[in-house]
Image: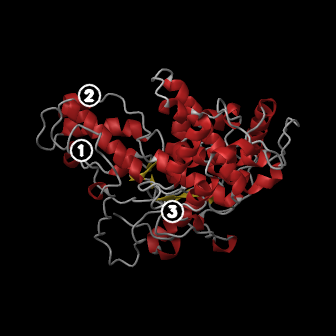
Amino acid sequence: MDCVTTATRLKGYWFHCLLHLTIWLYSFKNVLSLESLSEPIRIYSAPNLATPPKSGIFEPIEISPTVIPHYSFPVNSLPPMYPTHPSTYDPVLTGRCPVNFSAVSSIMERTASDCNQPLAAVVGNVICCPQFSSLLRIFQGLYSTGSDNLVLQTAHADDCFKDIVSILASRGANSSIPFICSAKSTNLTGGSCPVKDMDTFEKTVNTSKLLEACGSIDPLKECCRPSCQPVIMEAALKISGVQSYLNDDKGTGGISTHVDVISDCKGVVFSWISKKLPIDSANKAFRILSACKVNKACPLDLKPPLEVIDACHNVAAPSPSCCSSLNNYIASIQRQMLITNRQAIMCATMFGSMLQKGGVITNVYELCDVDIKDFSLQAYGQEGCLLPSLPADMVYDNSTGFSFTCDLSDNIAAPWPSSSSMTSMSLCAPEMSLPALPTSQNSGNPGCGGGGVDFFVPILSIFVFNILLF
């Protein structure tokens, strides 16, 4: 995989070409980096900016933010494919939410960054919505400070929810977060859970066990050998009354109702945890639990691949028509969002299973050189970005704009399922562990980045904003 070198390593003709790009980008301010896991976040200062070149004609190349000039906002609006740095303003609040929002200002800022206006939709499943959900849980605990309540009163829930969204939008977040994350004000009320007060909760639940299991969560173990999740479920079952209902053997009627009650009671359990833990500790714990959940399934909308099945049904060797159809299908789904490395494996396996059920027996991933990064949003039509499976946040600075980490950006072959059944698949089993990174053929080249590639806004934003616009 070709390595991207920084501007200080470019020599001769390409250096002049790169400098010429500075003039071409005169009116553009932002740069969004998709950082490689092995590379630290870079913050560049104004003295490092390059000077304009005298001449040079070249093809588009991947660039370092070192040569992007940092100008104030232009008078005219920028094209939609080049997002501006977030502007802030004073939000208009309802005045009817009895909460001091400054107490959660740090989490509000983090959520606004993770759900920033241009990218909230494409990082919603992995970054934005998990962080927004964590904010709501922490807010529940804050609301009940000094009282016996664990949830918001219905009269306050709608106003507080509106204020939360307004404050986030005033800090650059996407105002459509409730729609993107399928969140609503009733998430703050405890819904149909019969226990919503501190006294009854602590009399019913083994709180020492709950705090011990969820006070400090190991992000590497929780998803495969959970310690906190079963204790949360146990507590939710106890306060819901569903456990006693099942023990009394009253039948299976109204199962869907019981599921809703348990889900609402889990929200009450999260609220109690947020009251007992420091805000940052609670946020970290909730993000780890969300990561375990989102990595259990493929978030992409996989339509029936009828054309791919027709083109690849009887192939046994590389086929232009089969590969073309396969690539077109994958190109259509990869535009949906950025996904994690584990999600990409799930998506590749699920899609392969769909093809097998349609009669495609040959490993067309191998025939057509399909990689797991092909299932995630692409940069410049060439490089896919897979987000880490562990919780991650967007990072913002005045020089490089928003950035986030890409994991496994090398060419890792997509796994072809061993059978059409998905029931026995587990990413925790040794045989389903993440593939090892391949050794780069240029590992001895001192100009290599060491296993990853940094992607920046002029490359990725075109594809991101095409998705948002169309």
Q: Secondary structure at mark 3?
A: loop
Q: Where residue 353 appears, x then y in whole percent?
A: 26, 37
The first of marks 3 and 1 along the sequence is: 3
> In the visual, does 205 lie left or right of 443?
right
Mark 2 or mark 1, whichever is nearer to me: 1
Q: In x, y percent, where is residue 226? A: 46, 54
- What element does badge 1 sit on? loop
Up-down: is 465 above or below 103?
above
The residue pinned by badge 1 equals 417
Residue located beneath label 2 in the image: 307
Q: Is residue 312 left or right of residue 470?
A: left
Q: Farthest residue in the top direction? A: 253
Asked whether 269 or 242 is in front, the reply is: 242
Q: SS class of the residue under badge 2?
A: helix
Residue furthest toward the front?
A: 248
Give me the C-alpha separation between circle 2 and circle 1.
20 Å
Q: In the shown orientation, is residue 442 left or right of residue 245?
A: left
Q: Please state which amino acid type lies under the numbered disc 3.
A: Asp
Q: Which mark is residue 218?
A: 3
Residue at 64%, 47% (x, y): give it.
270
- Alpha carbon of mark 3 to alpha carbon of mark 1: how far? 30 Å
Q: Residue at x 19, y 39 (%)?
A: 320
